[in-house]
Image (cartoon, grey):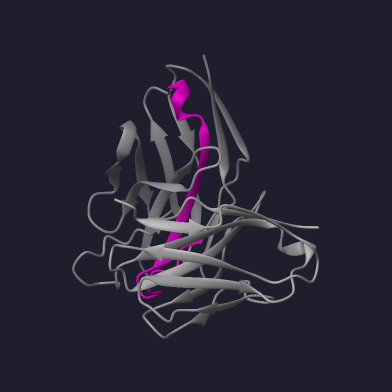
Amino acid sequence: AQSVAQPEDQVNVAEGNPLTVKCTYSVSGNPYLFWYVQYPNRGLQFLLKYITGDNLVKGSYGFEAEFNKSQTSFHLKKPSALVSDSALYFCAVRAVTSYGKLTFGQGTILTVHP
Amino acid sequence: NAGVTQTPKFRVLKTGQSMTLLCAQDMNHEYMYWYRQDPGMGLRLIHYSVGEGTTAKGEVPDGYNVSRLKKQNFLLGLESAAPSQTSVYFCASSPQPRLAGDTGELFFGEGSRLTVL
């Protein structure tokens, strides 16, 4: 079985400050890891993924995430937050052999204050 | 570029009524999925399909049926709606894993908000 935990329901940060949204996972074998963002009344938009290779992954809108196999974590980061980054963020995991079925975390609401 | 299109976007049902949600994708993807999104629970997989004519159960399949008669369409049906099925439903699609074009990601529709009274 595969699972994802996002330990923080909400993250608040001031504009211009760095942000981190935490994610830990459990999966059998090698993982594919993803971050998606959801704006109000919209579908999920892909941000970035880790498949293999470099542990630091860069994605859309200046976001990046670091894969840490020993800690089974895949935290989302951004050096300088924008008010427009405020949204609901989902971490997701898929085992290499699970044929596309993603398991999502419960989501973290990110609020960036002006 | 339409991508993944869901209809209807909003629907209100009474307990016991039936309805069908339609998902259409124009990316020639093999795999399609139905998820439901509930507050504090993330997205949970209801059913999925790995190709035309195939369907399989996900994490929370009870009370739902699906059909994939055409490659581009994936239908989600509720035969007798219950208040516990009040949710936002998302359809997604992806290329066949490990083949050309598979980046691992899913492509989502905009969602269908269903309320069962």
Residue B21 visible to an observer of this rendering: yes
The residue sitting at 35% across, 35% down in the picture is A63
The residue sitting at 29% across, 44% down in the picture is A57
Which residue is at the far top? Answer: A114
Which residue is at the far bottom? Answer: B53
Q: Nearer the viewer, residue B106 or A28?
A: B106
How many callouts does the rendering have? 0
Q: Nearer the viewer, residue B87 or A37?
A: B87
Figure quadrant of residue A93: bottom left
Residue A101 at x, y percent in the picture: 44, 69
Residue B70 at x, y percent in the picture: 38, 78
Residue A28 visible to an observer of this rendering: no
Q: Quadrant of the C terminus of chain B?
A: bottom right
The residue sitting at 47% across, 34% down in the picture is A20
Whether residue A57 appears in magenta in the rendering, the answer is no
Figure quadrant of residue B65: bottom right
Q: Nearer the viewer, residue A17 or B78?
A: B78
Q: Nearer the viewer, residue B73 or A94?
A: B73
Is B102 located above or below residue A111 in the figure?
below
Residue B22 at x, y percent in the picture: 51, 66
Locate residue A71 relative to residue B12 in the image: left or right: left
The residue sitting at 38% across, 50% down in the picture is A68
Residue B51 at x, y percent in the picture: 36, 80
Region rendered in magenta: A82-103
Is B81 located above or below residue A21 in the figure?
below
